[in-house]
Amino acid sequence: MSALQKAIAIIASGACLAALLLPFATRTGAPAGIVEFPLAAAFLVAGLLSIARFRVPVSLWLDGVLAFAGAVVLLVSLSVIGKAEAGFWFALVAAWAFSWLLVERLSHAIGRGVVLNTLGLVIPLMFGASILVIWEAATRAGGVPPILLPAPSLIWARIVSSLPTLWADFQQTFLKAVLAGYFIGCGAGFLVAIAIDRSPFLKRGLLPLGNFVSALPIVGVAPILVMWFGFDWPSKAAVVVVMTFFPMLVNTVAGLNAAGGMERDMMRTYAAGYWQTLFKLRLPAAAPFIFNALKINSTLALIGAIVAEFFGTPIVGMGFRISTEVGRMNVDMVWAEIAVAALAGSLFYGVVVLIERAVTFWHPSVRGGRA
């Protein structure tokens, strides 16, 4: 057991002890302590046991059960809590600590080959679930007004009740503006990088111009492009093109120079021309750089399209909905749009990563991740 894991287990045990001794809540329903006292006592005993040197599978099961049981009991108890006291918050800290301990031990287990690499998905899922539980418990038990920060349950209810609107906004922003601008911007950046690599004159002339374009603020460019291309999705796609062009250009130029001198000399000894060297040596060597730009642009594209919609759009789109619903104080709808955008951006990024692993399977970083 590492020093960090032992420290987390001690924090969890201390939080359990505090939850056991301090008042839990001012109740409006069931008698005080009917659920929380057994929970805190079980947490305390198991927290002390978790410090022991169990085998890895036993520790993982113990931490997972504690984290899950603590989260469920805490969320259920929120329905009868009148006002959360100190004991509730310490119990919440304990549940978070056990979740953290599970992630730590699972990471070490995966690194040692104890758990299959595919189970590494448990780590981000566990982290995300922990954040949602703390968010839900803190907003409901703390009495946070929904206009300031709605609970995840309220956001989910809004998503379920507004699926047609969210789907229309998703189509307008992501399926049209983001994808069109992403492919045009990345494609243009790649082709210009090839031209710059071929011509020293373009390298001296276009790269400084690319630096200038990348420094332009999006809030200044977006209104101009909206005036040029209209209020529909093409103007948002133009903003995405501007944002994604320069990262692809710079990374591709750097990647084309990544091939070693010995490899280039060997290609020359084989009487290979520029294009043969480009396709057989330099582009494969540049693939990690190109995919790095594609991953960066997968997030920049969505941000650029949403921000561009603040400056003029039809009555549909993620950015339009966010700006409109903020003015109406419908904060749950704003968070629903943010959740859809975050999910879409994460999936888009994940697809690019999967394509990268399939294309650059030979690269040491990919082979090392699979070992």
Image (cartoon, rainbow, N blue to C red):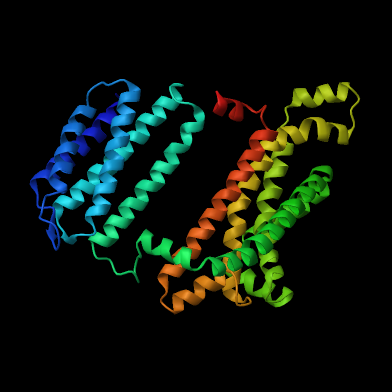
Q: Indicate whether 203 appears above or below 25.
A: above
Say whether residue 216 is visible.
Answer: no
Q: Indicate whether 185 appears above or below 61.
A: below
Spot occupied by residue 46 in the image (x, y as percentages of width and height): 20, 32
Along the horizontal axis of the image, is 217 left or right of 274?
left
Give me the residue at 32% from left, 38% from top: 100
Along the horizontal axis of the image, is 36 left or right of 155?
left
Spot occupied by residue 105 in the image (x, y as percentages of width and height): 35, 29
Q: Indicate whether 186 appears above or below 94.
A: below
Tally the numbered discs.
Answer: 0
Spot occupied by residue 29 in the image (x, y as percentages of width and height): 15, 61
Give me the residue at 36% from left, 50% from top: 131
Q: Indicate whether 138 appears above or below 306.
A: above
Say whether residue 238 is visible.
Answer: yes
- Rendering quarter of residue 65: top left
Give me the residue at 64% from left, 34% from top: 357
Along the horizontal axis of the image, is 55 left or right of 40?
right
